[in-house]
Image (cartoon, rainbow, N blue to C red):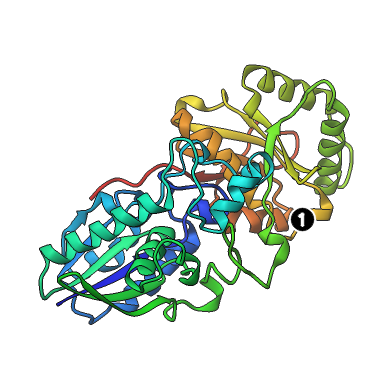
Amino acid sequence: MTRLYLIRHAQAEGNLYRRMHGWYDSLITDTGYRQIAALTGRFDGVPIDAVYSSPLTRCKTTARAIYVPHHLPLQIEPGLIEIGVGVWEDLPFGDVQVHDPERMRLFGEVSPAYSVEGGETYQQVQERMVEAIYKIADANPGKTVACFSHGMVIRTALSWFRGYGLEGIGKVPHSDNTGVACIEVEGRDVRVLFEADNSHLPLEISTMIKQRGPGEERTVFAMGNANLWFRPWRPYEEKELYFRYRHEAWVDIHGREAFFDGEAFYQAALRASLIEPKSVMVACLGDEIVGMIQMNLERDAESGVCFVPFVYMNPTYRHKGLGVQLIGQAVSTARPLGRDKLRLRCAPTNQIAKRFYTRNGFRKIGMAQDSQVPLELLEKDIGYPKED
């Protein structure tokens, strides 16, 4: 008999930024690293003979919780990878909800009828995940193995082993990030001992208490559950919108209009958007514009930087857990261009913004030298970690 722990990865960018990350190779968040530390404590003193992981970075990073302290090699098993979502990869949840609502509904309901171009069906995922688990068990008879995988594919396997079949995946509970299931495998007989156990996580670092994915139930922090979608700013017909956002942000931060040059700000945004429309994006919630993010893809590019001159959220929607999705849009724009850092400026007196940026991985690297008012330079690393 082989005992397998099936462990979901720690909180990753897709969970935080509300984006469709199947095979997209996202990174672990700051909260995710705290979850990994808690997982290490959970398995302290638990005998583990082998550790396997999905090939994606978010699983390999989480697997360090066990293979490093247990002095074991990490073995990669492709069958443990998350469901591939094809043309949806790295799109915001909100974008798919707005532009492909019926298939998003089927996806959220874990329907056997779900399919998307270039992606996998739930049946394909269930078959290859079950096969991967049997393969690992056969290679480790009588041993205890930790397998690091993804929420959806773990659910498909547990549904099969519980006898629910493909249609019964919805009966298997959603797992928190770093949630643990345990099964015993003997031949082709499998017994599920427990599932979705997050007892090692303090409430303040539990993902499920704050967010949900498509189709998941949630009763708290309802606005943080809302999914934004993004489109390019229309620089000519939405000029006044940009002026208004820039002016409101300037006065809110500096308390005066001195040094405010709205036309210069607008011209810089116009140039950026004409070079690359994704440089200036409008954030929408349903039919309403709720924010904007502007990027300068030329400035500091030789240093691997994506410079972010302007991040704005409508006051009505501030302090509701939505702003982090703007950061996610910047990451999604910058990373395919080979950038490994986001850099922006923040007024030293703007404590609310500083707390927001610090909470989301930005660190002060100095003071801006090209500003008429004091501004701190903040930077966030978005590069992939080096392999061991």
Q: Name the spot of residue 64 as percent of width and height, x first.
A: 29, 62
From the viewer's side, name the closer residue of 198 and 108: 108
Q: Which residue in the structure is indicated by mark 1?
A: 318
Side of 114 where 55 appears, left or right: left
Please give the name of the residue rendered at 74% of the width and 29% of the height, measured from the top-left corner. Answer: 233
The residue lying toward the viewer, choosing from 144 and 48, is 144
Q: Is residue 66 above or below residue 289?
A: below
Q: Is residue 75 left or right of residue 229?
A: left
Quadrant in which residue 157 is drawn: bottom left
Answer left or right for 387 relative to 217.
left
Q: Is residue 280 above or below residue 288?
A: above
- Quadrant into which the N terminus falls: bottom left
**Residue at x 46% of width, y 25% of height:** 302
Q: Residue at image x 41%, y 42%?
A: 383
Front residue (pair 49, 254): 49
Q: Residue 150: give x, y in percent of width and height.
A: 39, 59
Residue 238, placed above or below residue 383: above
User: Of the residues shown, which amino acid type is indicated by label 1?
Assistant: Arg
Residue 136 seen anywhere in this rendered image of the structure: yes
Q: Secondary structure at mark 1?
A: loop
Q: Residues within 10 Å of mark 1 (few under 14, many from 20)?
A: few
Percent position of residue 375, x then y: 68, 42
Can you tell which quarter of the image residue 53 is in?
A: bottom left
161 or 74: nearer the viewer: 161
Residue 259 in sight: no
Q: How many marks?
A: 1
At x 46%, y 67%, the residue is 168
In the image, 70: left or right of 149? Answer: left
| In the rendered image, the vertical position of residue 24 relative to residue 146, given as above or below | above
